[in-house]
Image (cartoon, coloured by chain):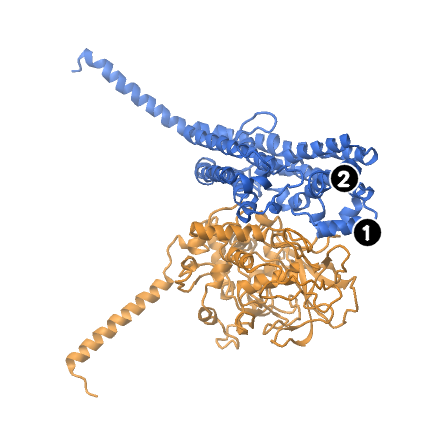
Amino acid sequence: MRIPAIYRVCLALVTAIVLILVACNKFDAGYSNPDDEWRSGGKQTVFDQSSKAFGHPFPSLSETLERVHEIGDAQFSSTFVSAPAPVNPGLGPIFNNVGCASCHIGDGRGKVPGTGEISVLMLFRLSIAGEDPHGGPNPVPGYGDQLQNRGNIGVQKEGDVAISYNDKTFYFDDGTSYNLRFPTYTVINTYTAFPADVMLSPRVAAPVFGLGLLEALSDADILSRADEKDTDGDGISGKPNYVWNYTTNSTTLGRFGWKANQPNLLQQVAAAYNQDIGITTSVFPRESTLGQPQYDGRSDDPELIDSLLYSVEFYVKTLAVPGRRNATDAIVQQGKQLFMSAGCDKCHTPSMRTAVNVVFPDVSNQLIHPYTDLLLHDMGDSLADHRPDFLATGNEWRTAPLWGIGLTQKVNGHNNFLHDGRARSLMEAIMWHGGEALQSRNKVKAMSSTERNALIKFLESL
Amino acid sequence: MLKLKHWPLFLGIAAATTISCNKDDNDAVDTTALKSEILQNVATNVCTKSYEDLSDKAGQLLTAVTTLTTTTTDDNLATCRNLWKSIRETWERSEAWLFGPVEVDNIDPRIDTWPVDFNDLNTVLASPDELDEEYIESLDEDHDALRGFHPIEYLLWGQNGDKTASALTNREKEYLLALAQNLKKLADEVKTSWTGGYAASLATAGASGNTEFPTQRVAFEAIVDAMGGICDEVANAKMKDPFDAQDPQLEESPFAQNSIIDFTNNIRGIMDMYQGKFTEDGKGIEDLVRSYNLSLDNDIKTKHSTAVAALQAISVPFGEAIISQQSQVQAAMNKINDLASTIDEDLKQFVQQYGQ
């Protein structure tokens, strides 16, 4: 088709304008206000560095929604008791803890039990070889897929886990030594025959703030960072987990949990109620003990009504992110440069933008700094739990968000990190990285003590 | 040339200028010493003092319960009940500074879990197990709903609050004694963690190497957050949940009908902290506020006394009030929320500005 010259000029102009607009748009997306860095959760950032730092609602919530958040807060901190009871009935018959906040103390991180203590802030997932009908872990006969280590009075718990550590000394390239403790987990005191080939995956309670913002990222945005076959050859894969979604009855992208094995917050919350506390909901209406001798046989399910379930989902969805403390400090800035140059940011993605959301504007279109890509990565044999979880292999873990990590000591009184809390400091956590992260770990290993200090200062400022 | 008659005016202007300069100078006065004094006093004479008091009273309750188990009379039961109310007063006041070891070391759930697990408690009482302190400790964190204030309350008052000494079974007495021993142990644990270092780190906030409180401002913020936090807890949870549900079963201390006293002591704790006075008067945040902003000081005190008065205007036990005195309950919640916003907004901003 022949186009008259004048039209061609017009077309060229229009194209140019469109290109400029697109370019502006792109520039806008990456535009960084100098203050942005302080606001890890975009407009849902709070500046509190006390032990309450993880427990604030989104600042933008309307009064009505703040009330829903409060109801969820009250429910999150409730203690359940055995049924029948006038208040909060339905605990157990077997369980890991009595309420949400009992593990997520201060909405924060659990830790490994001290010597002689029973494990209450962490739990153990179980499975045997094979898959369940939805492609998930295959439950252990008589135990299900989680070990409940406590029971109502007179009810047999499933068993305990004995934890022991073996300390080994390693050296940075400059000759400074550091220790890593290698855990051994042994299931003991089991109530009935425990198959020898059970796969065991320890998990500590993870912080619960900022989750609504992570849920607000679009699938496409998360998948844009995936590189399962490492086609760009940088040694980093980034693999999405696809997991069973009980709401849609289909397989969807996994985002939450240490192995990204939960597709959304509702299911994450309902699964925790069901497995950790023994509370049935409309999402998981069957007792975790169904088919086991501990089963209560009561026809009181679901034990938690939907309005409360949704209020707790809303509560964790609308917990604000703590802001940075000293982002512009020279040493912190140097630490950030080192974090980038070691390639940590390849998985711990510093910045993302949440999708536009007209239904819930509070999470819409926010520039956030979660330091995660929500994808799975091979973390090496030392960290492996050797227990597949949907598409996650025994070596793969989801990149953990780093926002707020510097306040762990303040909120939870400890510095235990990683899925089973084996690391006793941020530096130990870094040095545990293997697999795809080995090259980055080795760069840290080669740093001078001043540089290592700066890197830690940066992490502590998050 | 300036005429003599203008000199007074000139002097007046000069004097006014000097005075205003003087005022500016006052503003710049370094209050670090005052702030240290406040933190020192608050750490020692408010927080630590309250836990020492808690431990003393737990000891008295244990003695009285021991007597009750051997000499089970209504008089001895009444003594135990009075001591329970007395230790409860200390605890509820201390909830206005619910930060530090109580929270981090998980003391709060072990001492004040609610509700009571009746089924488990009945199973325990019916079991052949020996019920001693060791038994309670063996429950560990498994069964916080079986220890602390509220199971003791339940055993002392009974489900309907009308228990007589003769109705106390031997198993109940055994368990009550074990609970009282356990309470004493927990109270000692909090006390020791404050005397053994936490009080010192609060008192020396901002000193180099203080990781818990790297600046004085962080310490003041923690204090003010806890003050605001307890208002929120009382108005928007402890009162609002039973009120909205119109369900007396959701009341926190139903057996002893102690809830309104509990709420009042929670709010009282705010003033203890603000004035730096648990038993003896010392420096409090009050002194910092008064040096810069008398109207804020006045605002806090007025709203505080209004809130306390609104609570006291409820003249029947809380479980009844949510049905029969709804306007009084609503008014009390409103006044406590008014106090909360002054603390959370004005006082918080104040310590952020002057607490550096």
Q: Is residue A173 visible?
A: no
Colour of chain B as rendered: blue
Please give the residue where the numbered disc 2 appears in the rendered image: B181
State which quarter of the image contains the N terminus of chain A: bottom left
Q: Which chain is orange?
A: A
Give the quadrant of residue B238. top right
Mark with earlier residue (2, 1): 1
Q: Assign a secondary structure to mark 2.
A: helix
Q: Residue furthest top?
A: B4
Residue at 41% from the left image edge and 65% from the top image edge: A355
Q: Is residue A49 visible?
A: yes
Please give the residue where the numbered disc 1 appears in the rendered image: B127
Tell me if mark 1 has few (under 14), some (14-19) or many (20+) residues whose alpha carbon lies within 10 angstroms of its own: few
Q: Nearer the viewer, residue A274 or A353?
A: A274
Q: Assign a secondary structure to mark 1.
A: loop
Which of discs 2 and 1 lies nearer the camera? The answer is 1
Number of residue marks: 2
Residue B55 x %, y %: 70, 34
Q: Is residue A361 left or right of residue A332?
A: left
Q: Is residue B267 left or right of residue B29?
A: right
Tell me if mark 2 has few (under 14), some (14-19) or many (20+) residues whose alpha carbon lies within 10 angstroms of its own: many
Give the quadrant of residue B316. top right
Residue B305 x %, y %: 50, 30
